Amino acid sequence: MATIFTKIINGEIPSYKVAEDKNFFAFLDISPVAKGHTLVIPKKEVDYLFDLEDELYAGLQLFAKKVAVGLKKTIPCEKVGVLVLGLEVPHAHIHLAPMQNEADILNFSKKLKFSPEEFEYIRRQIAQNIEL
């Protein structure tokens, strides 16, 4: 059975896509810890990040870097934090979240709320700053 992320990649579930290439997909987290919180995933469905083949793993990291650069250009922040969690969805993914300090990204119990229009505005702003 396909994961929710595979369904997002396939367009079966809507998302706020910020970037995509033939192997990777990046979209806004709908329960963000920060404005611009983005998930970066391989299109290949693999549960555990460190089970990815070396080439795919390296490609995912490079793709995430491009997305992070676009995020930093778009959302005023000190840095873009990187977290690998992922027990809830069995599909390897990286969280990228703009942050002013470590507490901004470490408190996953504090979620922000945005309207669909706000998500779309954020998505467009980030997408135009990503160079693939």
Image (tube, rainbow, N blue to C red):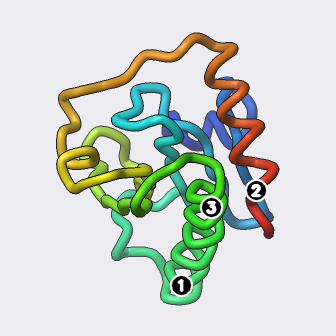
Characterize the local packing of mark 3: few (<14), some (14-19) or many (20 or more) Cα atoms within 10 angstroms: many
* Neighbours of disc 1 within 10 Å: few (<14), some (14-19), many (20+): few
The quadrant of the image that shows the C terminus is bottom right
Sooner in the amino-acid sequence: mark 3 or mark 2: 3
Residue for point 18% across, 39% down: 107
Q: Residue at left 30%, top 49%? A: 86
Say if mark 3 contacts mark 2, CB within 8 Å. no
Q: Disc 2 designates what residue?
A: 129
Residue in the foreground of this view, choosing between 31 and 118: 118
Q: Quadrant of residue 108?
A: top left
Identify residue type, mark 3: Val
What's the amino acid at mark 1?
Answer: Ala
Q: Is residue 25 above or below residue 61?
A: above
Residue at 65% of width from left, 30% of height from top?
15
- Disc number for residue 122: none
Q: Quadrant of residue 59?
A: bottom right
- In the displayed structure, 51 sits above or below 36; it is below
Q: Circle 2 — which element?
A: loop
Q: Which residue is mark 3?
A: 67
Picture quadrant where residue 115 is located:
top right
C-alpha gap between disc 1 and disc 3:
14 Å
The answer to whether residue 92 is visible is no
What residue did someone put label 1 on? Answer: 58
